[in-house]
Amino acid sequence: MASGPLTGIKILEFSQVIAAPYAGQILADMGADVLKVEPPEGESWRLQAQFAPLESKTYQTLNRGKRCITLRLSEPEAQQVVHQLLADMDVVLINYRPDVPARFKIDYETLSAIKADLIYVDLTAFGRKGPWAMRPGYDGAVQAVSGLMAGEGKIRSDDGSPMTISSTAPADVTTGMVLADATTTALYHRQQTGQGQMVQCSLLATALNLQGSVVMEHPEADHAFRNPQRDIRIKRAEEGATYPELIQLREAAFQATTDPFYRAFLTRNGALVVAAESDQQRRWVCDVLDLDESMIGDEPRLEALFVTRTTEEWLEKLVQKRVPCSPVHFPEEMSRHRQVVDNQWMVEMEHDLTGTQRQLEAHLRFSVSSLESPPASPPLGRDTGQVLGSLGFSDDEIRAFAEKGII
């Protein structure tokens, strides 16, 4: 197992899809011993877009450094295994719908009665209260209800329907980071007080926090623009305006307030982003473009200028002036990018079944508690026999579990 600042911490993970598995992977990267529990057929993300039997890139990207056992949690014998495992665990990480854990006897009340100082990090889609509490939910649904999707303003060209943010799963990925942070925070509290606790998180709460000032309400700050625009959209919706019309209304209002020196521009051979935030940086952009500062708001003029040269030519001039800027890349290009290679952010690892792969490694570096590269994600149930054996189950008992479909 990997070394690191969390060496010695043991985590029992009941997870699927992205958010909780990503949290578990971050904690494993930091040195924690993460034991993932999957159903005998495998969790849903393992089964999506398989390139080998029971193996997908999406699963392998989110579960490196872990051990894996299979248990059919609806069976009493499997529940007893979990309760036996708990004696050696510091943390339970779980992302089931609120009503499911109690059915499997892995809810906080049950498990904390067995281990009083347990840290139980619980993720739901929409929170544990309110009319949506028991709804299942994934990133796309959370994008929709939270405003992330409409805030992005993208619509399909064929029918005008909303488009999901497809480059990543923003609510899921950021929630994974929040869950990992919540785990280490609760561990610190337990170290100081001896107390375990339940930590609650939801995809919806994370998605709302991603939008900070847009969701925030402030009577003084919002009276001139935000609230009137919101009320206009609500009124137009009540009058029967279509979704594309509402998006166009919002976009037109926001474009009037955008900064022309903080946006992407087409160039002769691609595109680049200029991110000039300060007045000084804007003056430097004007110097590069040989523009009078009175032209700052003339976006058509800026667009016409940027398209006259290549991305590389503009970057050379802008970087020389210390203007924040970047070329626009596709994500598939980044594993070989010089900045990624020089910082050694990709690591080669060997998967038990599918061979060599290159993955992004842990996103943190420590000067003292150094991290070792963790092993690749585990094949389904790889560690079931070893873990059950460590609990005292005989080979015959383990075979019987397999024959009954419990493992």
Image (spheres, rainbow, N blue to C red):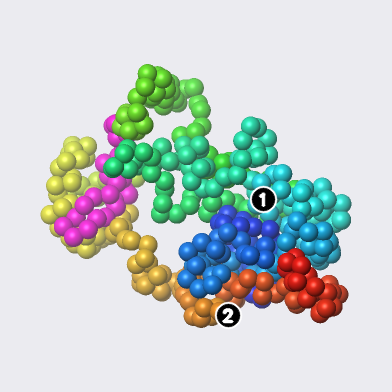
In this view, the residue in front, 262 or 177, is 177
Quadrant of the rendering where the N terminus is positioned: bottom right
In this view, the residue in front, 191 or 120, is 120
Give whichever of discs 1 and 2 has the lower sequence position: 1
Q: Is residue 323 left or right of residue 84?
A: left
Dividing the picture into quarters, in which one does residue 3 lie?
bottom right
Q: Is residue 212 left or right of residue 247?
A: right
Q: Return the residue at label 2.
A: 352
Dividing the picture into quarters, in which one does residue 80 lie?
bottom right
Q: Is residue 60 above or below residue 192?
A: below
Q: Amino acid at mark 2?
A: Asp
Relative image position of residue 377 (x, y in whole percent) = 58, 71
Which region is colored magenta? 250-276
Relative image position of residue 143 (x, y in whole percent) = 48, 42
Residue at 63%, 65% in the rendered image: 41
Report if residue 333 lies within the magenta region. Answer: no
Relative image position of residue 209 (x, y in whole percent) = 54, 41
Q: Return the residue at label 1.
A: 96
Residue at 76%, 49% in the rendered image: 103
